[in-house]
Image (cartoon, helix red, strand yellow):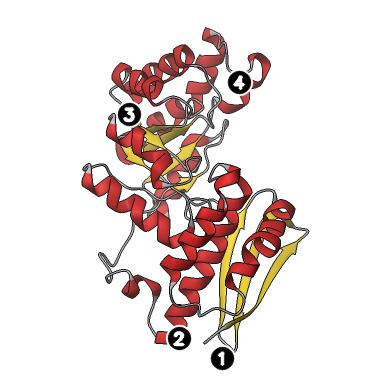
Amino acid sequence: MKITQIETIRIAEQHHNLWVQIHTDEGIVGLGETFYAAPVVEAAVHDHFGPLLIGRDPFPIERHWEAMFRLSDHAGYGGAEMRAISALDIALWDIKGQALGVPVYELLGGAVRTKIRVYATSLRFHGAGEQAKGLLDEGITAMKGGPTIGLAQASDGQFLSPKELDMALKPIRDIRDAVGMDMQIANDGHGKWTLPVAIRIAQAMEPYEMMWQEDLMPLLNPEALARLQAATKTPVCISERLLSRWQLRQFIENGSARIVMPDLIWTGGVSETHKVAILASAHQVPFAPHDATGPV
């Protein structure tokens, strides 16, 4: 089997999404996906990595991944290049699964469980309690939102007034008032805050027994994140913003990451995300994959 063509698909309704189809001479087509800056990633797929794959056997996925990753060294092993690698890797695994007639999870060692707990990425400023009731009716027992994210813009994350912090706590209070501890709540900060403000946010939310605090600060300094984790009893969770096992390693090893959350459409596809999961397991850290994009 040989790779004959790499096709990219974009649609106006989801302009940040990019789908990749890898065609083979046996008629099998693998489908992959990534998200954000689609035109730039599309160029990387065709101009940067396409020549490495076209005409090659799609089966040696690890060899292809390493070749693409080494070629991206000039880009710092991240950015558009890593998103392109992610989509291509997913498509290669899809080809292999189809060709062998098995789901991809069988190629990775087989199913570990038959059910996976999910959470809803949605938390309304108004009506969060009723929203939580509706989710519980659907069997969803955890939800995530970012009530502090919009408040960071005015000061670039440097300052959060007591009034603003109280406003951010309102939907969390509403959930606890409506459903008690039946619903777990995670907070996402989108990397907006400085360390002092991040500590204030995490500590202010502690009475509500948060599931985790995710990306309260830019993930640039493992020591700073360790100081945040030391200042709160809530587990710190990171992050789809770290795009390989090497970027995540320092945060895991210094104990600042209590939950590891890569996104396989950014973190090098199935191949690299599987390695991140093994790294997390070696440090006895829970693994909760991120996904807020398309259906692939």
Q: Amino acid at mark 4?
A: Ala
- The answer to whether residue 148 is visible is yes
Q: Label 4: which residue?
A: 152
**Residue 247, horizontal then vertical, whole percent:** 43, 39
Q: Counting residues from the N terminus, which is met first, the one under dot 3 or under dot 2?
A: 2
Circles 1 and 2: CB distance less than 8 Å? yes
Q: Quadrant of residue 13?
A: bottom right
Query: As rendered, which of 184 and 14 lies closer to the eye?
Result: 14
Query: As rendered, which of 289 and 144 lies closer to the eye?
Result: 289
Label 2 to label 4: alpha-carbon separation? 49 Å
Q: Is residue 179 left or right of residue 286?
A: right
- Nearer the observer: mark 2 or 4; the answer is 2
Q: Amino acid at mark 2?
A: Ala
Query: Residue at image x 56%, y 65%?
Result: 88
Compared to residue 4, the image places residue 115 above or below, namely above
Q: Counting residues from the N terminus, which is met first, the one under dot 3 or under dot 1?
A: 1
Q: Counting residues from the N terminus, which is met first, the one under dot 2 or under dot 4?
A: 2
Q: Is residue 98 left or right of residue 228?
A: right
Q: Secondary structure at mark 2?
A: helix
Q: Is residue 164 left or right of residue 47?
A: left
Query: Residue at image x 55%, y 41%?
Result: 76
Q: Which mark is residue 256?
A: 3
**Residue 26, horizontal then vertical, whole percent:** 56, 91
**Residue 33, horizontal then vertical, whole percent:** 58, 62
Q: Label 1: which residue?
A: 26
Q: Secondary structure at mark 3?
A: loop
Query: Residue at image x 51%, y 54%?
Result: 70
Q: Which mark is residue 99?
A: 2
Label 1 to label 2: alpha-carbon separation? 9 Å
